[in-house]
Image: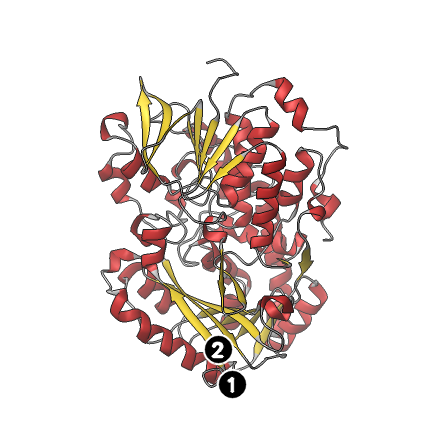
Amino acid sequence: MSNESSHPVVVIGAGLGGLAAAVRLRAMGHRVVVVDAGDQPGGRARSFQRDGYSFDAGPTVVTAPYLLHELFELVGRDSRDYFELTPVDPFYRVLFAEGGHFDYVGDEERLLEQIGRLSPADVDGYRKMVAHSQRIFDVGYTQLADKPFTNLSDMLRIMPDMARLSAYRSVYSLVSRYLKDERLRQVFTFQPLLVGGNPFHTPAIYLLIHWLERKWGVHFAMGGTRSIVNGLVRLLEELGVEVQLGTKVSRLAVTNGRVTAVETEDGKRIAASMVVANADPSTVYTKLVDPKDRSRHTDRSVARKRQSMSLFVAYFGTKKTFPDLAHHTIVLGPRYKGLLHDIFERKVLTDDFSLYLHAPTRTDASLAPPGHESFYVLSPVPNQKSGLDWKEEAPRYLDRILNHLDERCLPGLKDNLTTCFSVDPRYFEEQLQSYSGAAFGPEPRLVQSAYFRYHNVSEDVGGLYFVGAGTHPGAGMPGVLSSARVLERVVPRGSEAEARAVCSPRPAYTPTEHAAE
């Protein structure tokens, strides 16, 4: 195929992965069109506006911020002209069910002091654990996060390193080798839940998240994550990329084994040189690609994949403020392994829960009316394979969560509510088009990671590529942004003249340039 085409690359989905992909493709000299079914860009990173409050709908934790800065530097811009990131301290406050809390921070001295108070015998163990996580990071992230795993040989080459690092063990198992206090084990193993994984089954390569957070910190985008989305959309407009909202794709037209166009529900046909799907690959294959055009990803093979859990998320505002609350709080329940087993394996809704509470007005008061607070609280729940009737369950579950928060960390919450609404697995299945209502695509198990995850390059349809949570390297903002990086290794370059037109000369870039931000 010629590197130049009269047709644009069509990106399906204006989530963070799709927007990042569009920037990179434009910098490679391609003409690009982005289409999205929603009424606003962002996908999972959209926002809700209600009664004077602003709520991030999905991702709120910004790690590895260099991946965002890099997108703008590719085309000679400075991301700080588009949005502002600010560090969050503590990264997370973890509230234990039996009382007390632990502030997970980036400063090792503060971490060791807290560990020493909880379990003096685990101080040395933590030092060894963090050294192990750094070794995993050096292989699993630095070397592999933006590498395509399209051939089994790619996987076989890294197996010796993974075996030496015990990456085949679960995150919980590896952390437990170093830490004996159960409270500390929970503090340092909940992170896989943020990318859709059960710490008792997610491979220990995901322990790299700990060093990633220690290395670059945890940040918040002033104005909410939507400010990042808006900044990327503005950048694309400057680069001549059109973002078409309210455009739902109904089918990929395939001719002689290669995608040739995107067809939409309103009858439009957009001719395409290539298609990059920032959408759940399970849904793309089963809903958008005709069965005759796919031999590997059949309906049956897709159905066999283990999908991640789903989420119940409540958004609410209060006329009372809670100044002692941290920006990010993990509210642990009385059970850990048993609760996760119920969610991931038994797929039942239990009486207890663990929660993630986001209080963005702790950092940015503009997200609520003066003197008010804006919140969201997230609870992992089974995906739609559970058969739960969320029309019946949602109101009851919301009430239980609000009561729990009122008792645990937001006294007077229910008497001071000014607005409140929620989303559940139906939102992920119906509005975000996630297979089985899974919030993070396929569950990140060993046999669904790297080569065994959906490939960035489709094996069934020529010219079809994937970015986002469902493909390699996986969910979470660093994973999604890194999946767009992979495109530079697998997509042919476009017009050099177009690339020169959008990419002004810039100094050599290294991630450490922005590490302190």
Query: Does dot 2 land on a helix, a strand or a loop?
Result: strand
Q: Residue placed at 49% from the left, 82% from the top? A: 413
Q: Amino acid at mark 2?
A: Thr
Q: Nearer the viewer's eye, disc 2 or disc 1?
A: 2
Query: Does dot 1 land on a helix, a strand or a loop?
Result: loop
Q: Is residue 517 visible?
A: yes
Binning the other alpha carbons within 10 Å of mark 2 as few (below 14), some (14 to 19) or many (20 upward) gives: some
For this rendering, which residue is in front, 465 or 173? 465
Binning the other alpha carbons within 10 Å of mark 1 as few (below 14), some (14 to 19) or many (20 upward) gives: some
- Above or below, 21 relative to 93: above
Distance from Cα at disc 2 to Cα at disc 1:
15 Å
Q: How is the image coloured?
A: secondary structure
Residue 418 is labelled as 2
Q: In the rendered structure, which disc, 2 or 1, sits on the residue that comes first in sequence?
A: 1
Image coordinates of residue 79 in percent, x first then y, are 68, 45
Q: Amino acid at mark 1?
A: Pro
Left or right side of 356 for 81:
right
- Above or below, 29 relative to 192: above
For this rendering, which residue is in front, 378 or 130? 378
- Residue annotated with mark 1: 411
Q: Residue placed at 62% from the left, 78% from the top? A: 371
Q: Where, by quadrant of the figure, is residue 396 drawn?
A: bottom left
Q: Is residue 173 visible?
A: no
Image coordinates of residue 334 in percent, x first then y, are 41, 77
- Above or below, 308 relative to 411: above
Left or right side of 169 for 321:
right
Image coordinates of residue 309 in percent, x first then y, are 36, 57
For this rendering, which residue is in front, 132 or 210? 210
- Above or below, 453 relative to 95: above
